[in-house]
Image (cartoon, rainbow, N blue to C red):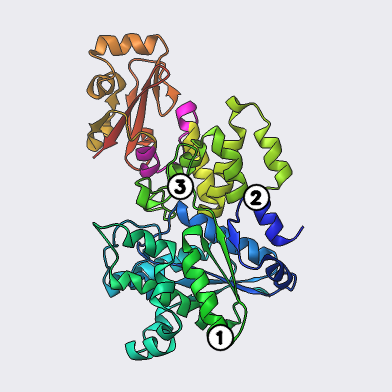
Amino acid sequence: MKLLEQLEKRGMIEQVTDRAALDELLSKPGQAIYIGFDPTADSLHVGHLLPALMLSRFQRAGHRPIVLVGGATGMIGDPSGRSAERQLLTLEIIRDNARAVGAQLSRFVDFTGEAAAIMVNNADWTARVSYLDFLRDVGKHFTVNYMMAKESVRRRLEDREHGISYTEFSYMLLQAFDFLQLHKTHACAMQAGGSDQWGNITAGIELIRRVRGAQAFGITFPLLATSSGEKFGKSAGNAIWLDAARTSPYQFYQYWIRTDDRDVERFLNLFTLLSGEEIAALCASPPEQRAAQKALAREVTRIVHGEDNLALAMKASEVLFGGDMTGLRDRDLADIFADVPSFSIDRAALGAGIKVTDTLVESGAAKSKGEAARLIAGGGVYVNNRRVTAADTHLRGEDLASESMLVLRVGKKNYYLGKAS
C-alpha cells in the first residue's frame, strides 16, 4: 500500500495537491518534507501530536523530515483559524520557546541514520533579509487579490470587530518564503500542515513555481475535535501539554484513558503505530473493559514521555484501585488526589510517632478517637492502601508514601491527603 493511501486509511490526510505526481515522488526514498511549528509557548501540546507523528511516519517510510521551528514567523502570528490577533511575544521569549519546542520534537523523529531528520529555524534566513528585498523578491509574486481570496484572510476581513492587521496579513508571504528557502537548500518539495494551513501552503507552492520553475506539493491533515465538539490544543481551553512540568505523565495518561468510546478508534489510528488489525481487535473488546483506551494511553504516553514515565503513570493510575504507592513522588500523589481533603502533619512529631487515631481525627476522617477506633476495628482504615489493623498503631517517618505525603483511606472511596512539614 502506498504511503498516502496508508495515511488516508488512518484518517490522517485531508487534502493533497496533484495526487498522482505526489505518489510518484514518494515512490523514491529520501524525499524531504517539512512541517513548521511556531514557538508561541515553551511547550507543544496535544494539538501538535498529529504533525509530529506525521513526520515520524514519513521518516519510517524512508523519507527525510525537516522540523521547522518558527523563530521568525512566531514573532508575527499566523491568522489561520484565529478570530483575533495573537499577542506578540518578545524576541527573548521566542528564542527560549524555540529551544524548548525543538527539544520536544526530537522525541518524534531521529536525527541520525540514513534518513536523518533536519531541524531548522526560519529566523536564520529571514532575519538577514531587508524589507525592501523581501518586497522585491517575494511580495512581487503575489497580488493582493490572491491573498485576500485565501480562507484564513477572507474570514478575518469579514469580521468587522477584529479585522486583520498588516502584520498578520503578511504571514502567508513569510511561510511561502520558508518553503522556497527549504526547496533551495534541502531540495524540499513537500510541506504538510493542518487543514487551516492550506492557503499558506499553496502560496509557497506558487512561489516555488514562479521563482524556480519547479513543482512542489502540499499535504494537509484534519484539525482535530472530539465527538463532543471540543477542539484539541490550548486555544480551546483544554491544554494538555507535552512538557512533563506543565502536564505530568500521570495527568497526560489519564487524559487518554478518559477518551470517549466514539473517539477511541480514530485516535488509535491517528496517534499510535499499532496496526489496523491490532486496533480492530482492541475496539472489538467489551466497552466496559476500556481496553482500547488503555492501549491508547499506553502508546501515546510512551511516545511522549518514555518507558519509565509510562510505568510511573500506570502505577499511579492503580493507586485509586488499591495499588502499591512505593516509588511515587509528591507530585504524583498531588495529581492523583488533587480533589480530596488535605491536612497537615508535624514532621518532627513523626519521629516519635503519631497515633493513627489522632491522625484520623486531624484529617476529618473521624469525628472522635472513639469513632476512629471503631473504623479501624471494622477493617475500613488504610494508610497508603495498607490496612490498619490496630487502633494503637503509630505513624512514623517511614510511613510517608513519598517525600512528604501519606494517604489515608476510609472505606473504598474516602481519601485524605496528609502533607508533612
- Which labelled disc corresponds to residue 274? none
Residue 397 lies, in percent from the top left, at 33, 36
Residue bearing the label numbered 3: 249
Circle 2 residues within 10 Å: few <14, some 14–19, many ≥20: some
* 161 vs 234, nearest the viewer: 161
Q: How many marks?
A: 3
What segment is highlighted magenta in the picture? 319-335
- Residue visible at 28% across and 33% down in the picture: 350
Secondary structure of the residue carrying numbered label 2: loop
Secondary structure of the residue carrying numbered label 3: helix
Residue 215 lies, in percent from the top left, at 62, 78
Please state which amino acid type lies under the numbered disc 2. Arg
Disc 2 to disc 3, how far (Cα)? 26 Å
Q: Is residue 88 visible?
A: yes
Residue bearing the label numbered 2: 10
* 382 vs 263, nearest the viewer: 263
